[in-house]
Amino acid sequence: EVQLVESGGGLVQPGRSLRLSCAASGFTFGDYAMHWVRQAPGKGLEWVSGINWNSGAIVYADSVKGRFTISRDNAKNSLYLEMNSLRAEDTALYFCTRDLRGSSVRTGWFDPWGQGTLVTVSS
Amino acid sequence: DIQMTQSPSYLSASVGDRVTITCRATQRISTSLIWYQQKPGKAPKLLISGASTLHSGVPSRFRGSGSGTDFTLTISSLQPEDFATYYCQQSYTTPFTFGPGTKVDIK
């Protein structure tokens, strides 16, 4: 069974940093691009960042560019999101998701999704 | 960036009803349109890709159509498990963008 499990969320003060992790299992992690998508409480979905299979192509939403860094470790079947200079508007449930079509970060078919990890930015 | 809109934002329907949700892109995206279903407290699930291709395991009562800028998700006969929020998303180019969602509620 394909499974994605996020961790690392929590309550953090504005301006501070947090690192999210996503553990993948049930598929050949290194064959797929991966993405982070977030959802503010009671709101819709916002794509945050994506990384291709070998970390050779990385893309970010403008809202996080320069503050967030996506990375992966294929040997550990893990995806990461380093979040710096956090703002109140970054408060959201952060989902890890696989690009269903394969290794390219540019196809944008998200399936499956993890259950998410909640990040709350507040003083 | 490509903006996505959906209508209606909310609809109330009964079991057995035919339901139609529309999604519009601010520029032409061919058939690069995905539909997701999200139930409360759960992660989204991919329903339809390429505007009209049903994902594995998705019931045939779901149908997607459209190309260019205008798209439609139709549920032919609403079932109790279909009450959820539905999102469209363009996969044409980054940044990938989602519609604001359509909540389908029980009448």
Image: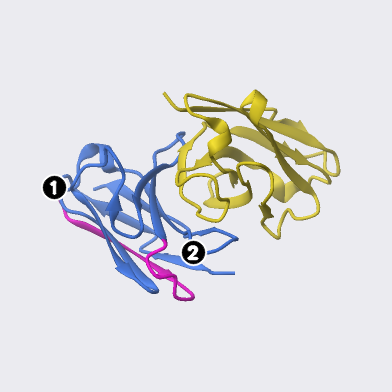
Q: Which mark is residue B16?
A: 1
How many C-alpha atoms fall within 10 Å of the one at disc 2: few (<14), some, or many (≥20)? many
Magenta-colored stretch includes residue B30: yes
Amino acid of disc 1: Gly
Mark number, residue B103: none
- Give yes or no for residue B85 being in the magenta stretch: no
Is A59 rendered above or below residue B46?
A: below
Q: Is residue B92 left or right of residue B66?
A: right
Under circle 2, the secondary element is loop
Label 1: element kind: loop
At x 67%, y 30%, the residue is: A21
| Residue B83 spot, x, y in % from top left | 30, 43
Q: Quadrant of the N terminus of chain B?
A: bottom right
The colour one sees for chain A in the rendered image is yellow
**Chain of the residue under the numbered disc 2 shown in the image:** B
Point 69% across, 48% down: residue: A56
- Closer to the camera in the image, B42 or A98: A98
- In the picture, measured across the screen, residue A106 lies left or right of residue A76, that is left
Chain of residue at mark 1: B
Q: Cα distance, mark 1 to mark 2?
A: 34 Å
Span shown in magenta: B16-32
Protein image colouring? by chain
Give the left or right position of residue B57, taking residue A88 as reference: left
* Chain coloured blue: B
Name the residue carrying label 2: B92
> Could you tell me which residue is drawn at 50 percent across and 54 percent down?
A107
| Above-or-below relation of B77 to B42 | below
Mark in the foreground, 1 or 2? 2
